[in-house]
Amino acid sequence: MLLPLIIALHAAAAAVLPPLVRALGARAFLAASAPLVLAAAWALAQAPAVLAGNPAASRLSWVPALGIDLDFRLDALALAMVLLVSGVGAVIFWYSAGYFRRSERGLGRLAATMTLFAGAMLGVVTADNLFALYIFWELTSVTSFLLVGHDDRKEGARRAALQALLTTAGLGLPMLIGFVLLGQAGGTYRISELVASPPGGPAATVALVLVLAGAFAKSAQVPLHYWLPGAMVAPTPVSAYLHAAAMVKGGVYLVARLAPGFADTDPWRALVLAFGLATMLLGGWRALRQDDLKLLLAYGTVSQLGFLMLLGGMGSYTSAVAAEGALLAHGLFKAALFMTVGVIDHQTGTRSIAALTGLRRRMPVLAVAAGAATASMAGLPPLLGFVAKEAALEAFLPGHAGELPTWASVAMLTGIVLASVLTFAYSARFWWGAFAVKPGVEEPRFHRPAAAFVAAPVALGALSLVFGAYPKALDPIAQTYAAAYDDHGAPYHLALWHGLSMPLLLTAVVIAAGAALFHWRAIVERVQEAMPRGPNAEIGYHFAVHAVYAVALSVTRRLQTGSLPAYLGIILATMLALPGVGLVRALVIGDAPLPAGNDLRLWDSPLEALVAVVMAVTAIAALREHRRFAALILLSATGFAIAGLFVLHGAPDLALTLVLVETLTTVILVFVLRRLPATFSVRPPGWPKRLMVLLSGAAGTFVALTLWLATSARTEPPVGASYTGAADEAGGRNLVNTILADFRALDTFGEVVVLATAAVAVALLVLLNRRDRVIDEPAAEAPEAVPGVPGPPADEEGSAR
């Protein structure tokens, strides 16, 4: 039960951070990291049992009536993700304490939102229930929206945040449908049970496609990659956390989580490999032409996410080992590089490659740490990125990838080699652009960063080197996750040296080709400029958004005509077309037989007949009345007659409520009628009027018949009979009040919320009306100056009052 408490601790910390930031400034990020440190420490404490094959699990009952629980599970894959989300996340929080200034606008809100995001991401990677995972998934979308749009004064930040939200959360809705279909097909919503016993059939196939759509959007796969580079308007610590260590890996994690059970289900493997490879190639190619260091890393992240996606979704033993290694490697080197860019931008005021030169002399420690992280990204030994890249190449060698035909294995291997060449080239471009001496470029003037500010990227760069030189420390995690697949008697381990092998030869080819590509970068730039522009995914996004907007406007213009009779007619017609047709069909085929004659009572008291006559007469008279005021009085009489029925049936409290509502409504409408003509506009008799009469009569008949059948179709005693004893136990004297306050408390709370919302809306409208009157009020004309008479006094800014 400790893990749910740790997640709740993130929310509690977020609640106290705004006042803490006001007191401590950016140093409050050090306190904000406490829940993340606790989560990482807890995961490390559970690691021995997890690696021994005993995942840590806990359950909280959520909706017992529906069998929905909050299940949490820490296995090898979740362990790796928790180390990234919470471990690397804590380092980024420490870095934020030196990055942000006390004067940063909305710093308390930013710290609280980052902490909430950390808790939501922790829930995503440990949830063992599809619904729980979806809730945390959408929480990460909402909090990332707030983080990307932190500086809401900038239109670019608002636009990028909205774009990220519409893409990730919009595709999350089909994913939810996929979760429902998958749970229904498998008979459970426990993820571990679904993976252990995967369902089949068309429903499961459709569900997997919908789930992959949501995962591709979250992890910025082509053609849904456009939102990630746009999100670089966020502060650099946010980018380091969301787009290196946490959020964008959510889709990769989900694919890797489901792959052991569903990788062999068509079309899973084809979709994952095709989109992953396309993303890897496109992201690498686009990264080569970026001048902004942060954008270069953004497109590099897109490329690496494609790499992680195809490894996590391949569904083989070696690819699973490679996926675990690549997940950890990417989190370490990419977070370190984002923070490196933050240091450079913070000290020099620029991220442009063309404006930076000589930084390796002024920041030697940072240059070395960034060099280690860049080398890991490029796949150079002895870094962790090299170890993971070797495993990936091994996974797709012909004859080793037994799940793929030879031609597909060769195609995938060729694509990975080409993408790795691009990765090496843009990695070299990054370090050269940030730290190299460029002839003819003026060296920027800046103060050297404090040691504490540089410590975070240095620490992560050092870890890339340590785990690369000693990958045995991480291999047990990879082996435990990959144990779900058949190793065919040849297990693969993360190691720095596998001997002279084909992956090593391919690595040498990648290094040579990547170095050549970087050396002739001027030619590459000219080739990129000369190439015709292909379809732009972001233009497609804007086209889709505007198309939806245009369709919504068109539908609104046709349906929202402002005619109340038309609205009521549509509602009544829908009621008759759906449940009405079903009722008639049930009566015709005998599924809903009419009650026996002795079940029909016209009234319990002769007074009910009198009240019914009053209701009918006043309703018909109101329909025929042409004067507005007289029609209002007749309608009010109908309402008061209904209140009389409540009195006759022993419900005086309901009658009193209805009398108050009718009285208040009548009073309000009397004031409204003062501004309306005295009479209604009389329409000539025609089909519209006859159709409305027929529609109203049919609706009344349907409601009366439904109530008659419903009251006569009871098979169990009324639930209200048990309320009397329960009310005594609750200590209530008024049964209706007890029902509202105790038995239907949630429903009553909903009604209170509706009333409060309406009150807030009315208040806003009133205030807006007042503000508009003040803004639109014409200024008084200044009086003409009279000689010898002083003018109006001036305020502090010198303007006349």
Image (cartoon, helix red, strand yellow):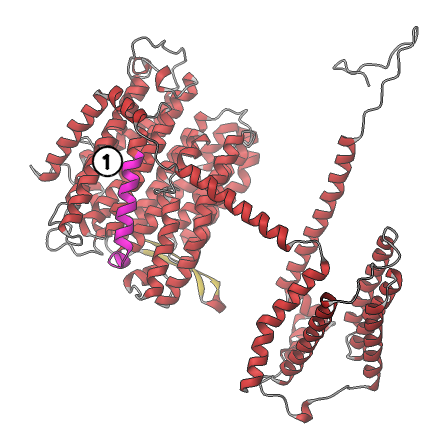
Which residue sits at x=22%, y=49%? Answer: 320
Count of numbered marks? 1
Q: Nearer the viewer, residue 54 or 798?
A: 798
Q: Quadrant of residue 738?
A: bottom right
Which residue sits at x=32%, y=46%? Answer: 252
* Mark 1 closeness class: few <14, some 14–19, many ≥20 residues within 10 Å: many
Residue 674 in picture, x, y percent from top left: 88, 52
Residue 446 in picture, x, y percent from top left: 41, 13
Q: Nearer the viewer, residue 648 or 780?
A: 780
Outermost residue toward the left in this view? 500
Main secondary-structure element of the magenta-colored stretch: helix
Residue 186 in picture, x, y percent from top left: 35, 66
Q: Is residue 279 magenta?
A: yes
Q: Quadrant of residue 703?
A: bottom right
Whether residue 148 is visible here, answered yes or no, is yes
Q: Image check: 1 left or right of 669?
A: left
User: Which residue type carries mark 1?
Assistant: Ala
Q: Is residue 338 magenta?
A: no
Which residue sits at x=75%, y=87%? Answer: 602
Whether residue 149 is visible here, answered yes or no, is no
Residue identified by numbered label 1: 419
Q: Is residue 788 above or below residue 183?
A: above
Q: Nearer the viewer, residue 52 or 223?
A: 223
Residue 363 in picture, x, y percent from top left: 33, 17
Write down the region rendered in magenta. Answer: 260-283
Which residue sits at x=10%, y=55%? Answer: 489
Outermost residue toward the top in this view? 788
